[in-house]
Image (cartoon, coloured by chain):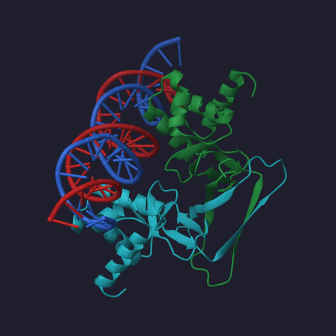
Chain colours: A green, B cyan, C blue, D red
Amino acid sequence: MNGTETDTAWAKQALRDVTLRATAARVAVLKLLASKGVPMSHSEVVESLAEFGFDQSTLFRCLNEMAHAGLLSRLDLGDHTRRFELKKSSDEAEFTHAHFMCVDCGELQCMDDYSLQITPSRGPRRNNLGTITEIMIRGHCGQCN
Amino acid sequence: MNGTETDTAWAKQALRDVTLRATAARVAVLKLLASKGVPMSHSEVVESLAEFGFDQSTLFRCLNEMAHAGLLSRLDLGDHTRRFELKKSSDEAEFTHAHFMCVDCGELQCMDDYSLQITPSRGPRRNNLGTITEIMIRGHCGQCN
DNA sequence: ATTATAATTGCAACCGGATTGCAAGTAACT
DNA sequence: AGTTACTTGCAATCCGGTTGCAATTATAAT
C-alpha cells in the first residue's frame, strides 16, 4: 500500500516462498493483482501491463504458474474468460467467496458480504459433492434490472 | 419418442409457435436436443448432425436463434463452452436449479436435490443483486476426491 | 564476483469456439 | 406458381487459450 519498493519486496518474497523465481513479469503481475481488488482476465492483465512490454504468452504462463503455485486463484465465471485474483494468504481453504456476474453489463462483483448455504433437500442424494472450489452466480444486476 | 414423423411434426410446430421458419436444420437440432436429455455444445451438435451436412455456422445461428426465441436455454457452465438444452415448456421462471461441474472429470450434475440460501451478512451491501438466472458450482466431485 | 545451469521469456504459430458479411437458396404468404 | 423476406453455406475473422523452440536471465555454486 505504501511505496513501490515495499510492494516489490513483498512480491519477490511471495514468489520465492512458493519456489518461483522473482522475475520482472511475475512481480509486475503480482503487484497489479494486489493493487486491484477484482479478478482480472489474461487480456486485462496484458493491457494493464502494456507499458512494460511483456509478451502475452509470458503473462499467460505467469498467471497459470502462480495460480498453480497457490498464489492466485483461477476463476471460470461463465463468460468464457478465465480470471485470476490474488489469493488471500490466510485461507488455504478451497473456496472463499462466491462471485456474481451481470449477464447484461458484465459487471463482476465479489460476494464477500453474502453467506451461502447449500443443503441437501429431500430425495436420494446422487453423487457426493466433494469439495467446492468456486461458486458463480449469474443474473441481472440492480442497475440492469 | 415414437416415429420420426411425429417428432418432426412436433418440432415444426414448436418452431412455428415462436415464429421461426421450420427449416431442416432447425428441425434436426430440435429433435436432437429433445432426444438427448443433456445440454449440448455447439460442436457436439455439429458432430451429431454431421450426416446431414449442415454448415457449422448454420447450426450456430440456429442454436442462438432458438435460444433467443425461448425454445432453448443457453448455459455457461464455466468450462468455456456454451451449451444448449431444450427448455421445459412448463417453466418461465428465470432460475430453476443450480449446476455442479467437476473441475477434474468434467462431469455435469443438475442440483435439483439441493437447496441454496443466499443471505446478506454484515457490512454495507454494495450493489443490489437483481434477479438470478444461473448458479454454477464447481469443485471436485465425490469420485475425483 | 564469476560461472554454470536450469528456469523463464519472446516470438511466432496454432487451436477451438464464437461470430460475421455476403451471395445463393428456400419457406411461407398470396 | 410468384414474390419476398428469411435462411443457409462459404469463407473469413476474432479472441482467449496454448505450445515449441531458441535466446535470455535468475539463482546456486564456485
Q: Is residue B10 left or right of residue D3?
A: right
Figure check: A102 above or below A17? below
Q: Where does the image place residue A105, in percent across and percent down from the top left? A: 59, 45
> Going 59% across and 61% down the picture, which residue do you hit?
B136
The answer, for residue A59, to whether it is visible in the render is yes
> Going 47% across and 38% down the picture, which residue do you hit?
A60
Q: Where does the image place residue A47, in percent across and percent down from the top left? A: 52, 30
Q: Is residue B22 left or right of residue A65?
A: left
Task: Report the label total.
Answer: 0
Figure check: A131 above or below D22? below
In this rendered view, identify the residue nearer to me: C17 or A3: C17
Figure check: A131 above or below C14? below
Figure check: B106 above or below A47? below
Q: Is residue A100 left or right of residue B119?
A: left
> Going 69% across and 21% down the picture, which residue do you hit?
A5
Residue D5 quadrant = bottom left
In this rendered view, identify the residue nearer to me: B15 or B120: B15
> Going 62% across and 45% down the picture, which residue do you hit?
A107
Q: Where does the image place residue A78, in percent across and percent down from the top left? A: 54, 54
